[in-house]
Amino acid sequence: MGGHRPGPRPVATGAFTIRETEHHAPMRLSLRRFLLAATASLALVGAALPAHAIPEEDAVAKLGVVVVFVVMGEQGQPAFVNMPDVEDKVLLPMYMTRELANEALQVVRNTEGGEGSRLLLLPLTEAIKLNEDLAKQLTEKTDKNLVISLVPSRQDLDLATSILIKQGAKKEDIDLNLQVPVFYTYPPLTITLPDENKPRVALFFNYSQLQKARSEVEEFEGEDRVMDWRQAFNLIVQEPDDKFFLHPTQDFLDQVRNGIPEQQILPQQILPQQP
C-alpha cells in the first residue's frame, strides 16, 4: 500500500468547556453545517443538500451506528488544532477508530496541562449536533471558524485508495475527494434485518467488516468498491426505496457488547463568559 496521510496532531487549548444540556437545533441546519465543516474546501458536497426521497431525519438517524472519538481536555475542552497559515480557522479532529483516538490522546497528555485529557465517544448523529454548537459559539465569541476533520483508519484509507486506483482513479483526485471511505461490493451484498423481510444494500465503514460479510456468503465473487461517506449519505437520502443499510462500525458494536452507555455530552457554554 502507498504511504498513508497522517492525521492531524491535536493540541489542547484550555479555553473551552463543555457541559451537559439538551439540544434543540434543527437537524437540517446542523447537517448542512456539519457537511460543510467536514468538507472545508473539498469538492464533493456543495452548500445545498441533495434532493431527498426519504425524510432527512430518517437518513441522519442511520448515522447513529457510526461512532467517533473526540479528545477532550481535563476540564472538558475540545482539543482544537491550529491550522498552519490559516489564522481564521481551527480544526477539530473526530477520530473514526479508538486506536487512532488513543494515539491522539497520548499526544495531548504529553503536552503541558494535558495530563487529565480523555476521550469523548459520540455517535455521528450527536457529533453533528456538537459541531453546530461549537461552530456557533466560536463564531460569536472569537474570530475563528470551525473545520471538522473526520479521521479514518489509516489501513482503511490505504485500502480504499488502492481500490480506486485499480478502477482508474487518479491519486490526486482521491486525495482531494476521499475523506472517509465507505466500502461496498458490486454486485451488492445485502442484509436482511431481523424485524424486516426486505434485503438492504450493505455499506461498511470498516473494510474488515466487509470482508467478514463476504466470507459468510458462499462463492461470492463481487468486486470491492468504495465511495466517500458524503457520497454514501447522498445516496441514502436520494433513494426512494430506502434500500441502503449502514453496517454498525466495530467500535459501536464493541461499545454495545461491553455495555458502555453512549455518552451524549453536548455543549451549552464552550467559551467562558467575559467578565
Image (tube, rainbow, N blue to C red):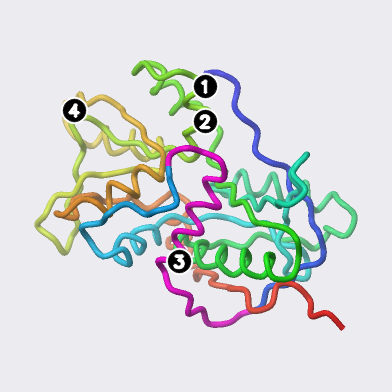
Answer above or below: position of 144 versus 102. Answer: below
Q: Tell me the magenta residue range.
A: 20-44
**Measured Cα–Cα span from mark 1 to mark 4:** 32 Å
Name the spot of residue 21 as percent of width and height, x first: 58, 82
Which mark, residue 172? 1
Name the spot of residue 10 as percent of width and height, x first: 74, 48
> Helix or strand or loop: what does disc 2 sit on?
helix
> Helix or strand or loop: what does disc 3 sit on?
helix
Answer above or below: position of 86 versus 22. Answer: above
> Helix or strand or loop: what does disc 1 sit on?
helix
Q: Residues within 10 Å of mark 2 (few under 14, many from 20)?
A: few
Seen at 26% across and 44% down, the residue is 202
Asked whether the beta carbons under mark 1 and mark 2 sit within 8 Å of each other, the answer is yes
Which mark, residue 220? 4
On the rendered structure, is 97 left or right of 230?
right
- Judging by the rendered image, the residue that carries numbered circle 3 is 29
- Judging by the rendered image, the residue that carries numbered circle 2 is 176
Of the two numbered discs 4 and 2 on the same chain, state the one appearing first in sequence.
2
